[in-house]
Image (cartoon, helix red, strand yellow):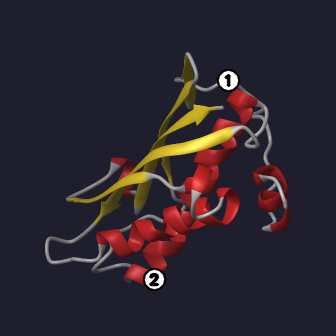
Amino acid sequence: MSTPDEKAKALGVAFQKPETPTYLDKCARVGNLLFASGHVSKKVGKCGSDFTADEGYEAAKEAVLDLLNSVWVENGTLNNIRVVRLLGCVNATPDFNDCSKVINGASDTVHEIFGKGGAGHHARSALGFATLPFNFTVEVEGIFEVL
C-alpha cells in the first residue's frame, strides 16, 4: 500500500517549501489540528461565463494541491494526516448551479492521495460567490487532523 506522500509523488506532485515567508500563515497548527487558509487556483474568471464546470473542476484540483503543499510544509509529511473538512468557494455567475461538481475536483484529488475512505473521507461545503479575491475561479480551505 502506498502512503499519501508516495501517491502525491506518483501523481506528479512535488511539494516544496516557500522561498520567502508569507504575509499570513498558509497553515496553522492548533494541538493536533491543522487549519489551512484559502488557497486559490491559477485560473481567473467565473464559472458559468468564462469557464465550464469541467474547467472549474481542474481549477479546484490546482487549489487543493497548493493547499496540500501548505499542509506538507507545516507538518513535514502527509502520511499521518486525516482530512476532516474542505470548504470550496466558486467564483460563479448567479445562474451557475454546478458548484458541487467544480469542488469535486478538490475532493477527488484528496481521495486519490488519502483514499476515498478512511483518512481521505471528509466533510465538505461547496458554495458559489459573486466574486472571489482578484477574480480567482476557485478557493479551497481545509481542516486536517494529525494522527
Which image quarter holds the N terminus? Answer: bottom right
Q: Secondary structure at mark 2?
A: helix
- Inspect this view and state whether residue 4 appears: yes
Q: Quadrant of residue 116?
A: bottom right
Vertical arrangement, residue 24 with respect to residue 83, above or below:
above
- Measure the C-alpha gap from mark 2 to mark 1: 34 Å
Tell me the kind of residue under disc 2: Asp
Q: Secondary structure at mark 1?
A: loop
Q: Residue at the location (73% across, 42% down)?
A: 78
x and y percentages locating residue 39 in the rendered image: 50, 46
- Inspect this view and state whether residue 46 appears: no
Q: Is residue 127 left or right of residue 52?
A: left
Q: Quadrant of residue 96?
A: bottom left
The residue that label 1 is drawn on is: 21
Decide which of 146, 67 is in the foreground and name it: 146
* Other residues around mark 1 within 10 Å, as few (<14) / some (14–19) / many (≥20): few
Tell me the kind of residue under disc 1: Pro
The residue that label 2 is drawn on is: 54
Q: Residue at the location (29% across, 77% down)?
A: 98
Q: Is residue 50 left or right of residue 83?
A: left
Vertical arrangement, residue 78 with respect to residue 117, above or below:
above
